[in-house]
Image (spheres, rainbow, N blue to C red):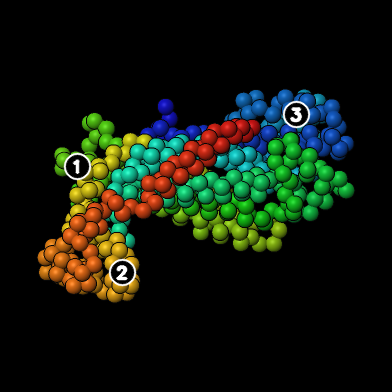
C-alpha cells in the first residue's frame, strides 16, 4: 500500500493519482505521443510507412537506458531531447531518424501531459462517484433528523440534517457536470511545430493534426499555439471548486462536532490519539485535513491564471507554471476526495442532541411559523410585530416565550393554547427538507452510476 507523505495528514493510502504523474509515466506518455505522430505521418506519406512498426515496438520505456537519458538531461538541460536520442539509438535501421518529424518539444510534452491528466481525471471521477454514493446513504439516513437551521450563525428555522446533505449533493453533481463538459476542451492534442504555424507539415497539416489526435483518442487543437493554456487553467479552476465544496462540507462537520454542538462526529478508530497531552481529545482530523488541502488547491488557481499570460508565440516559463498548477491541483484534490469518502461513510449523527439544540431557545425558533399562522388572520406585518415583541422580550428578560405569547392580545385572541403548542413543535416545520434529501439522494446515485460506466482511458 502506497502511503501519502507525512505532510498530508492523517496518513492514508494514496488514491492512485501520484502513480500517473511520475517521471517514468511522463516519459512513457511522451513515447506514446511520438508513436501517434509517426503513425499519422506515415498514413499521409510524410515518413516511410515501413519505419512505424519498429518505432512502435521500441517505444517502451523499459527498453531505454535510463542512465543515458539522465546523463543527457544533465548535459543538455533539455527535457525531451535526451529521451529522443535514446529512443533513436535503440531503433534498428533508419526508423530512429523519423522520430519527432516536424514536431517541437511542447507538442510532445504538453500532449503527453494531457494523456496523464486524462488518466488522473478518470481517478477523480471515480472518487466523486464514491463520494456521491456516500452522500446518498447519509441523506437517506438523516432526511427526517430535525436540527436548528442556522443563518448568520444563529437559529433561524428548523431543518433536517438531510437537507444539509442535499446541498452537498447538488453542488457536487454540478461539479461533475463541469468536469465532464470540459473534457473535449481539455483533452486536445497539440501539433503546430515551433511557433504554432504548422509550416513543417506542408499542405496536409490539418489532416495530420486530426489523425495524430485520433491515434490518442483526442481532438486536435483548432489553433495549436504554444501560448494557449486556458483549457488547463479551466481544469485547475474546476478542481479548486470541487475542493472548496469539500472544504465547506468539512467545515460544517468540524463545527457540528464541537462539544457545544455535538450533532455529529467523524469516524474515530479505536486507539486514535487526539493529543499527546490531553487524553480526552477526539479531533476532527479528516475535516481539518480537507480544509487545509483545499486551501492549497485554491492557491494554485492564481498560478494557473498567470500561466495564461504568455509572450509572443512561446515562453517556457508559463509551461512550467501550468504543469505545476495542474499536477498539484490533481494530487491535492485526490487526497481531499479520499478523506471525504472516509469521513462521510463513517460519520456519526446524533438526533437526540439535534433535538436538544432545537429546544435551546425555548421555542423562539418557531417564530416564523407562529407569525404566518397569525398573519392569516391579521396580516403578515401586524403578526410580525406581535411575535417580534414576544420574541425579543423573551430574549431580553429570560421569560419563557410561551408565557409572553399568552400575554399578547393579538395572539391570545386568535390562537388557542393548543394551537400554540402545536406551532411550537419544531419537527412539524421542516418544510420540504426530507423531500429534497430524498430527491438529491436519488440524483447522487444516478450520477455515481453514470461515472462507474465510463471506460478507462488509454
Q: Looking at the image, is mark 3 or mark 2 earlier in the sequence?
A: 3
Q: Residue at x 71, y 58 (%)?
A: 313
What kind of element bears circle 3? helix
Q: Picture coordinates of residue 110 (x, y %)? A: 65, 45
Residue pointed to by mark 3:
55
Q: Picture coordinates of residue 195 (x, y %)? A: 75, 54
Q: Residue at x 53, y 35 (%)?
A: 449
Q: Is residue 109 visible?
A: no
Q: Is residue 193 above or below residue 112?
A: below
Q: Picture coordinates of residue 291 (x, y %)? A: 37, 50
| The N terminus, quarter of image | top left
**Disc 3 to disc 1, C-alpha distance:** 61 Å
Q: Looking at the image, is mark 3 or mark 1 earlier in the sequence?
A: 3
Q: Looking at the image, is mark 2 or mark 1 earlier in the sequence?
A: 1
Q: Picture coordinates of residue 296 (x, y %)? A: 43, 51
Q: Which mark is residue 281?
A: 1
Q: Residue at x 44, y 41 (%)?
A: 441
What kind of element bears circle 2? helix
Q: Which of 100 and 248 lies nearest the eye of the viewer?
A: 248
What kind of element bears circle 1? loop
CB within 8 Å, label 3 to label 1:
no
Q: Which of 399 and 447 lies nearest the eye of the viewer?
A: 399
CB within 8 Å, label 2 to label 1:
no
Residue pointed to by mark 2:
377
Amino acid at each position: 500500500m502506497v502511503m501519502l507523505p507525512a505532510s498530508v495528514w492523517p496518513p492514508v493510502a494514496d488514491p492512485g493519482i501520484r502513480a500517473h504523474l511520475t517521471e517514468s509515466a511522463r516519459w512513457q506518455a511522451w513515447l506514446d505521443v511520438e508513436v501517434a505522430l509517426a503513425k499519422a505521418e506515415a498514413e499521409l506519406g510524410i515518413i516511410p510507412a515501413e519505419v512505424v512498426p519498429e518505432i512502435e515496438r521500441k517505444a517502451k520505456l523499459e527498453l531505454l537506458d535510463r542512465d543515458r537519458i539522465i546523463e543527457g538531461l544533465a548535459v543538455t538541460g533539455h527535457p525531451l531531447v535526451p529521451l529522443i536520442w535514446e529512443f533513436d539509438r535503440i531503433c534498428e535501421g533508419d526508423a530512429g531518424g523519423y522520430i519527432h518529424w516536424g514536431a517541437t518539444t511542447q507538442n510532445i510534452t504538453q500532449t503527453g501531459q494531457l494523456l496523464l491528466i486524462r488518466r488522473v481525471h478518470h481517478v477523480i471521477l471515480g472518487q466523486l462517484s464514491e463520494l456521491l454514493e456516500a452522500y446518498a446513504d447519509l441523506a437517506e439516513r438523516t432526511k427526517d433528523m430535525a436540527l436548528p437551521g442556522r443563518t448568520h450563525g444563529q437559529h433561524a428555522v428548523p431543518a433536517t440534517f438531510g437537507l444539509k446533505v442535499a446541498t452537498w449533493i447538488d453542488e457536487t453533481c454540478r461539479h461533475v457536470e463541469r468536469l465532464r463538459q470540459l473534457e473535449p476542451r481539455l483533452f486536445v492534442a497539440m501539433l503546430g511545430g515551433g511557433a504554432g504555424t504548422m509550416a513543417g507539415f506542408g499542405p496536409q497539416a490539418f489532416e495530420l493534426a486530426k489523425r495524430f489526435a485520433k491515434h490518442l483518442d483526442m481532438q486536435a487543437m483548432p489553433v495549436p499555439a504554444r501560448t494557449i493554456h486556458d483549457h488547463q487553467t479551466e481544469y485547475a479552476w474546476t478542481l479548486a471548486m470541487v475542493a472548496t465544496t469539500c472544504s465547506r462540507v468539512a467545515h460544517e462537520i468540524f463545527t457540528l462536532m464541537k462539544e457545544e454542538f455535538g450533532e455529529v462526529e467523524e469516524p474515530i478508530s479505536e486507539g486514535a490519539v487526539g493529543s499527546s497531552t490531553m487524553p480526552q481529545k477526539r479531533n476532527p482530523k479528516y475535516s481539518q485535513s480537507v480544509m487545509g488541502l483545499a486551501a492549497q488547491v485554491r492557491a494554485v488557481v492564481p498560478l494557473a491564471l498567470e500561466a495564461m499570460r504568455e509572450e509572443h508565440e512561446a515562453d517556457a516559463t508559463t509551461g512550467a507554471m501550468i504543469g505545476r498548477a495542474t499536477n498539484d491541483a490533481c494530487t491535492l484534490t485526490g487526497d481531499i476526495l479520499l478523506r471525504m469518502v472516509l469521513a462521510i461513510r463513517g460519520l456519526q449523527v446524533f438526533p437526540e442532541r439535534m433535538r436538544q439544540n432545537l429546544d435551546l431557545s425555548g421555542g423562539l425558533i418557531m417564530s416564523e411559523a407562529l407569525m404566518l399562522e397569525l398573519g392569516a388572520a391579521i396580516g403578515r406585518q401586524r403578526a410580525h410585530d406581535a411575535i417580534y415583541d414576544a420574541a425579543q422580550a423573551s430574549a431580553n428578560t429570560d421569560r419563557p416565550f410561551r408565557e409572553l405569547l399568552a400575554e399578547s392580545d393579538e395572539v391570545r385572541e386568535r390562537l388557542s393554547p393548543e394551537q400554540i403548542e402545536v406551532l411550537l413543535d419544531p419537527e412539524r416545520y421542516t418544510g420540504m427538507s426530507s423531500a429534497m434529501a430524498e430527491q438529491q439522494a436519488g440524483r447522487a446515485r444516478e450520477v455515481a452510476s453514470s461515472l462507474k460506466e465510463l471506460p478507462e482511458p488509454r
